Amino acid sequence: MSDTMFPVAILAGGLATRLKPLSDAIPKALLDVNGMPFIAQQLGLLRRNGITQVVVCAGYLGEMIQARIGDGAAFGVRLHFVFDGARLLGTAGALKHALPWLGENFFVLYGDSYLPCDYARVQHAFRQQGKPALMTVFKNDGRWDQSNVEFANGQIVAYEKHAPTARMEYIDYGLGVFARAAFDLVPADQPFDLAVLYQTLLRRKQLGACQIAERFYEIGSFAGLEETRRYLAQQELGK
């Protein structure tokens, strides 16, 4: 597992509707989490996992993030911002737009997720399985969000965000790994959702999986924001 770590794309283009009115004037990435912008907490976590290249797929109020964070040097990473442009491209569309800065293989995570897992282990699983994409899954049992993955014998059997079944005890953890070629399935400069890409790859038997033991944290809601603040405060105390 001594590979050079892949770059990370952070999807930070969402409108943060669940955090209104807090998000009317500030993007989620800049919300204060224990004395620093949330994206700074994310970058610290990535750097501790040996990741040094980060591309931010930015949209709503993205210029504010760029002005605050700059080139990432203060956090020990090289940071590049890619903006959607005149129309929002959706999660997969934004990633396709950012491909020139991401190389052959890369991680993807959401701009409101804090994912304390072993990124080198996930990268190793991606290489070992030899598929163009990998989804991390966590046995959620409906506890922290709605489970949306049926997972058995190390394989994803079904994935459905909008119509989950009783057999779905796992959840998309929020960290993906992709080969550039996976985005051949995504139309250029058109809105396209990452969930649709995952489902297409799954149908083609081109989606690998890696089970994560550590739970996820997110700041997409007020409750999630407070929970993330508490978790990170406990981590700081435990150092």
Image (cartoon, rainbow, N blue to C red):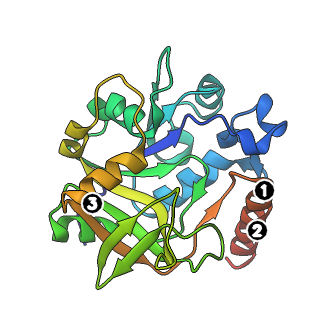
Q: Residue at x 30, y 62 (%)?
A: 134
Q: Is residue 53 visible?
A: no
Alpha carbon of mark 3 to alpha carbon of mark 2: how far?
38 Å
Which residue position holds label 2? 233
Which residue position holds label 3? 202
For mark 3, give the secondary structure: helix
Give how far across and how far down residue 11 sits, in percent: 50, 41
Q: Residue furthest toward the top?
A: 86
Q: Are marks 2 and 1 in contact (CB under 8 Å)?
A: yes
**If the image is split into quadrants, where does the C terminus sit?**
bottom right
Q: Residue 170 shows which numbered tag?
A: none
Q: Is residue 190 visible?
A: yes
Which residue position holds label 1? 34
Amino acid type at mark 3: Leu
Q: Earlier in the sequence, mark 3 or mark 2?
A: 3
Q: Are marks 3 and 1 in contact (CB under 8 Å)?
A: no
Give how far across and how far down residue 124 sits, in percent: 25, 70
User: Is residue 220 shown left or right of residue 204?
Assistant: right
Q: Earlier in the sequence, mark 3 or mark 1?
A: 1
Q: Residue at x 18, y 69 (%)?
A: 129
Amino acid type at mark 1: Asn
Q: Residue at x 49, y 47 (%)?
A: 76
Give how far across and how far down residue 19 sits, in percent: 77, 44
Alpha carbon of mark 2 to alpha carbon of mark 1: how far?
7 Å
